[in-house]
Amino acid sequence: MRARGRHHRHQMKLRIQIQDVRRAVWLSCLVLGFTAAASAEVIRQTVIYPPDASAGWPSIDFDGDAAPELSFEFEGLGNEWGGVWFLNVHGSQSTEVLLEGGSVLPLQAEDTVSLTPVLGQWQATWLRNYVWAMGFSSSPEGSPPSPGQGVGMPGYGDFMGVRFLGGSDWHYAWIRFGSLDPATPPLGWPSVLEYAYETFPNTPIVVPEPSAYALILSGCALFCFYVRQKGMA
């Protein structure tokens, strides 16, 4: 009986220790989550579309102040033989886009969006500054359409650089374009997939920038799962 009593007390002590560890771990996860949210430098948003959507170009409100910094316009120019589809970008009065000539400069992953870009120039948008262009044919007798060019097209970068004023300071940002269904692109029109901006003013942003908040919470979740499994063993 004494041995059984000691064994029972030992089990109870282990359960209490495991519960204490779980409380400590979940508390640390909570603290880490709030810390990551408070110290986040880059806000990154993924655009969600309906399952049957073929393409989409919503207006972009980087800082969530209900005043979009950018909007897009889909336009086709041509004749009975064919023509060109354009996706034009229009910025607010406090927004500039990284342009090269009259079109948006395609950026690659790991490029930096900053005050002094390596290529292109910061400019306000005008009537027709296109993100991408793609030829189309209206008749089988016409010449083959010209291949697509610009952001999100094959052989070009998938990102565009943006900056907007917050008060008197610039915030740098990027937008990523691509197909909504990479396996079977129905139209070949690059859509807005995600965007991000640097919350600290006058600070460059790298494309794409990993989310520190997501990384910390992912690691925390794995740690909590590990402790839970050890406790159940």
Image (cartoon, grey):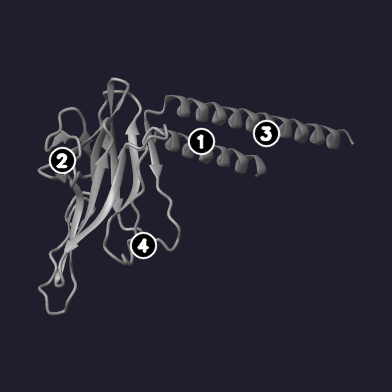
Q: Which amino acid does label 4 sit on?
A: Ser
Tell me if residue 84 can be seen: no
Q: What element carries label 2?
A: strand
Residue underneath mark 4: 54
Between 31 and 170, the residue placed more toward the observer is 170
How far apart marks 1 and 4 lie (CA) works out to 37 Å
User: From the viewer's perspective, is 227 left or right of 188?
Assistant: right
Total marks shown come to: 4
Which numbered mark, 2 or 3, is in the foreground of this view? Answer: 2
Between 90 and 171, the residue placed more toward the observer is 90
Q: Quadrant of residue 199?
A: top left
**Which of pointers 3 and 4 lies earlier in the amino acid sequence?**
3
Structural crowding at the residue carrying mark 1, measured as other residues with C-alpha within 10 Å and reported as few (<14), some (14–19) or many (≥20): some
Which numbered mark, 1 or 3, is in the foreground of this view? Answer: 1
Residue underneath mark 1: 220
Q: Which amino acid does label 1 sit on?
A: Cys
Q: In which quarter of the image is the C terminus?
A: top right
Q: Which amino acid does label 3 sit on?
A: Ile
Structural crowding at the residue carrying mark 3, measured as other residues with C-alpha within 10 Å and reported as few (<14), some (14–19) or many (≥20): some
Pinpoint residue 97: horizontal percent, then vertical percent. Answer: 21, 37
